[in-house]
Image (spheres, rainbow, N blue to C red):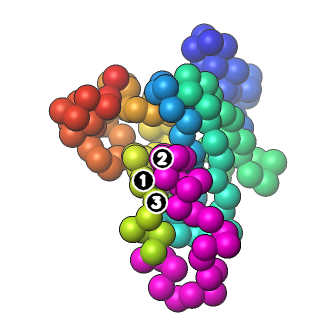
Amino acid sequence: MASFLASSCEFLDGSATRIYIVNHTNKKIGYQFSYRNPVPEDTLLQRYLGIRGVKAYSSDTLWAPTMSDWKQELSDGSYLQILILDTDVYSTKLDHDKYNWNDPDLIDTLRNDVTVLQRYNLSTQDLEELHYIISYPPTEEMRNVIMWPPYQESIQSGTAQ
C-alpha cells in the first residue's frame, strides 16, 4: 500500500493534488484541516469545516481544493493544519441536537468535549519530504514537523511509531 501511495501523490509535472491521511491504529479517527494564513488556533472551532473519518488501519485522500495543487495552495507561506480527533468522543459528544450552534460559548464547550489527539502544522517542504503521506500516530519521518503533542512526547507516551 505504501508504494502505491507514494507513487500516486504527484503528477509528472510535480504538482501534488492529494495528501493521504493514514491511520496506523486499531480505532477509527477523524480529521479536520485548514490552510489559511494565519492558521486558526484550532480548526475544530471552524464550524463550517467538516470532519472526515478514517477507519482503523486505513487511509483517506485529502484533495487540494479549487482544482489546484497543494504547492500552489500553500505558496504564500501558509501552513496546512490537520487535527486528528478521537471519533469515539467526537461522535458521542458532538451531538447536533445537544448544542446550540448560535451560543457564543460553544467554542469553549467544544474544547472541553472533543479530544484532539494530534495537531500537525505542515509546510510544503514537510509535505514533499513526507511524500504527501501524513500518518497517525506520527512516524519517525515526521519528527521535524511542527506538531502537538511534540514528536518526543509521542515517543514517550508510546503513541509514535
- Quadrant where the N terminus lies? top right
Whole-percent x and y of residue 18? 68, 36
User: Amino acid type of disc 3?
Assistant: Val
Q: Is residue 151 left or right of residue 142?
A: left
Residues rendered magenta in the picture: 80-108
Whether residues under marks 3 and 2 lie with C-beta atoms below 8 angstroms apart, the answer is yes
- Magenta stretch: residue 83 in it? yes
| Front disc: 1 or 2 | 2
Q: Is residue 1 left or right of residue 117?
A: right
Whether residues under marks 1 and 2 lie with C-beta atoms below 8 angstroms apart, the answer is yes
Whether residues under marks 1 and 3 lie with C-beta atoms below 8 angstroms apart, the answer is yes
Asked if one can make out residue 72 in the rendered structure from this viewpoint, the answer is: yes
Crowd rating for badge 2 (residues with CA inside 10 Å; few <14, some 14–19, many 20+): some
- Magenta stretch: residue 99 in it? yes
Q: Nearer the viewer, residue 119 or 158?
A: 158
User: Amino acid type of disc 2?
Assistant: Asp
- Quadrant where the C terminus lies? top left
* Residue visible at 66% across and 26% down in the picture: 9
How far is the residue under mark 1 from the one under mark 2?
6 Å
Task: Kindly identify which numbered label has been placed on residue 126.
Answer: none
Give the residue pinned by disc 2: 86
Q: Earlier in the sequence, mark 3 or mark 2?
A: 2
Q: SS for tag 3? A: loop
* Residue visible at 45% across and 33% down in the picture: 136
User: In which quadrant of the rendered view does residue 46 lie?
Assistant: bottom right
How far is the residue under mark 1 from the one under mark 3?
6 Å
Give the residue pinned by disc 3: 114
Whole-percent x and y of residue 94? 57, 63
| Front disc: 1 or 3 | 3
Q: SS for tag 2? A: strand
Give the residue pinned by disc 1: 116
